[in-house]
Structures are given as structure tokens and as C-alpha cells.
Amino acid sequence: MLYLFQLGHQPHISTAELEAVFSQRKISYKEVFKNNEYLILEIKKKLDTDELINQLGGIIKIGEQIELDLIDYLKTKYGKIIFSINDQKLGINTKKELKSAGLSARYVEPKNTATILHNNLVKRQTDLTVIDKKLFYTSAIQPFEAMGERDFDRPGSDDKSGMLPPKLAKIMINLSLVDKAKTILDPFCGSGTVLTEAMVMGYKYLLGSDISPKAIDDTEKNILWIKDNYQITDLKYKLHECDATQLHQIIIPNSINTIVTEPYLGKPLRGNENKITLQKQANELSKLYIESFKSFYKILKENGTAVIVIPQFRYQDEWIKIDCIKEILKSGFELMPFDKDDCLLYHRPKQHVGRTIYRFKKT
Ligand SMILES: C[S@@+](CC[C@H](N)C(=O)[O-])C[C@H]1O[C@@H](n2cnc3c(N)ncnc32)[C@H](O)[C@@H]1O
């Protein structure tokens, strides 16, 4: 069966996330088509697309192939036919054709996922995509409203240090390949986005630490808020106020399966900093990350993984990068690349900071 995946605004990351999730679930697939927006996969196993979309951070919608042609398919629908399709001209012509066949039809321009949801098109199975001469209906769509609430309505937030977008937290958890029954640690937990998204995804064993008492307080508030809102009962979590370079002082050696973290990214940037300032910040962060990895080595289990954001700073047309990878590898880690890339760059055009995602394994 063919499945269509609409990729997020960082398509290379969405693809890497899908690969990780399918490899973890031992689902084999064949790539049939790919461009910057869509990926078509042939998958023998029937997917529960509702469950899957809730696990993923980087996929906007999932579609399933329709074997009928467009008009014949829409004629199978009862009552007024309300539909959208990714090709406006085709949508308008299809509406005319249905009307001339005596059927009542309305074409909805699919501006964004909200339009699709508010017109109930997922339930109706009439949000359609034509791509690679194949027709798909959307069977699941990203729960963007719930994600927005978790991002903006949480009780504890820290605008100064910045918060990881919930989507990216989910992506990083998926990239870590960690099993639901295992422990995730975020040693720079901030207001707890990694931990709260892990809760929503069904992880039960969580540890968080941060050097700031306010961060620990915010994380606790947010965990309790999610616990309440999502009626999570069997959660085991612990939070510690601790410097990430000293974790081995408080956490049992070889006890952690996975670390997923967006660490301290330095002082927020305005974009007018000179090169020396950015280089200085990069050097300071390099030391922090190298020292933190020495501590991670002690507390991770053998083959334990660490998925971490390493920032890079925009200076005019170049990136100032943090030189720490070689030292991290020397402290007992190996890189687990994503397909052909050692890291994945997450960056929006106007941002001064790019986030590179690295995945390490303790050797
Ligand atoms: C970018 S924020 C993390 C944000 C978090 N991912 C979220 O979404 O809320 C970085 C955090 O690192 C913490 N931090 C800075 N230096 C630290 C250190 N040496 N050890 C542990 N935490 C540290 C800060 O207090 C801050 O909460």
C-alpha cells in the first residue's frame, strides 16, 4: 500500500525522523517518490496513521492511496461533497464536473491544516493530494492545536533562555531511538519541553536537571500540567538542580538509556554581534559541552545514546561553529549519523542561531 507523508518545513529532518521511527518499529518500506514537500512510501504493513501522526513532530499529514480516479472517488461520498485538493485548477474543474453531473459540491482551498480540520475534511476523507500521478486522501493530520497549547499555554515558561519548539522535541526523542520503557534524561531541561513531549508520546521514566532553580520549578509545573491535562497516571519522574558537568555526582553510573537535550545555547543574539564576540561564545560553549559529555559518559549505559542540539551562529554569510565534536568522540562516544549526514541543521531563514542535531552513542 502507498502512503503519502507531507514533510515539515525542514524536510531533511522530517525524513530522518520517519526513518528512525520505522527502523525502531521494524517496519520496512520502499521509497517511491520524494521531493521537498512530499514523500511516498510503499509499506506492506497497515499503519495506524492516527497513532503515528501523534508520535511524529516533523510530519504535517499522512495520506493513503485511492485506487479510483478523482471524480469516481468523490461520487462515492454522500450529500454535499466538500473537498480540497493541492491543485487549485483541478479543484475548481472537478467541482464544475460534479455539478454538471447534478451533484452538490464545494471546493475548499487547502490554505493550511486549520482549513482542513475546520471543514472536517479528514473525517470526510476528502482532503486530497495528487502527486506523482497518484491520488491520496489525508487520513491523519498533525495535532497542531494541541501542540500550540502545549507551547503557549503551559504554566512555566522562560522567554529568556528560549524554549525548544514541541515539534523539535518530539523529533529529537524519535531520533534517539529510545524504547518507551526506558529512561530519558534532559540535563539542560529549561522549562521541560523534552520531558513533557516525551510524556505525551507515552514515555514513563523521565529525569530532568538544570543548573537553575527556576528551570526546575518551571519543569515541575509543566509536568504536573501535562499529567493533569492528558490524564497520565503511571509516570515516574525526578528533577535535580545540577550542573550538567557534575551529573555523575548525583546520578547512578551506567543507569541512563538516553539523553535528549537542547543545552545552554549562549546569550540570546540580536544579530549585530561582531565576529570576536560570537567566536568567544562558541569557545565557551565548546568547553561546557565537552565537560558535560565527560559526565554523560559516566551515567549512560553501554550503547546509550545522546541526541543533542549544538548551536551555530550566523555571522553575515557564514556560520560560526562550535568546535567540540572531536573532543566528545575522544571521551568515549561515536557518531550515529542520519543517512549520509553526521548532523541535521534546523534553521529558519531569519534566525541568528542554527541548531545542528547530533546523535552520539557511548562506545
Ligand atoms: C536553551 S535552555 C533549554 C530550554 C529547554 N530545551 C526548553 O525547551 O525549555 C538551556 C538551559 O540550560 C541551563 N543551563 C545553563 N548552564 C547549565 C549548566 N552548566 N548545567 C545545567 N544547565 C545549565 C539554563 O538554566 C537553561 O534552562
Image: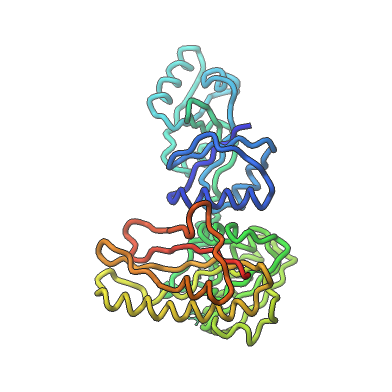
Q: Is residue 288 left or right of residue 202?
A: left
Question: Residue farthest to the bottom?
Answer: 249
- Residue at 60%, 21% (x, y): give it: 76
- Residue at 37%, 66% (x, y): give it: 353
The quadrant of the image that shows the N terminus is top right
242 shown above or below 5: below
336 shown above or below 52: below
The quadrant of the image that shows the C terminus is bottom right
- Tell me residue 128's x, y (percent): 51, 31
- Tell me residue 99's x, y (percent): 46, 16
Would you say residue 122 is visible in this rendering?
A: no
Question: Residue farthest to the right?
Answer: 234
In this rendering, the count of numbered labels is 0
- Residue at 57%, 21% (x, y): give it: 73
91 shown above or below 287: above
Would you say residue 236 is visible in this rendering?
A: yes
Colour setting: rainbow
- Residue at 53%, 25% (x, y): give it: 81
Question: Residue farthest to the top?
Answer: 101
243 shown above or below 156: below
User: Residue 37's quadrant in the figure?
Assistant: top left
- Tell me residue 224's x, y (percent): 63, 71
- Which residue occupies the foreground of this view, 135 or 283? 283
- Tell me residue 133's x, y (percent): 48, 25
Q: Is residue 254 left or right of residue 194?
A: right
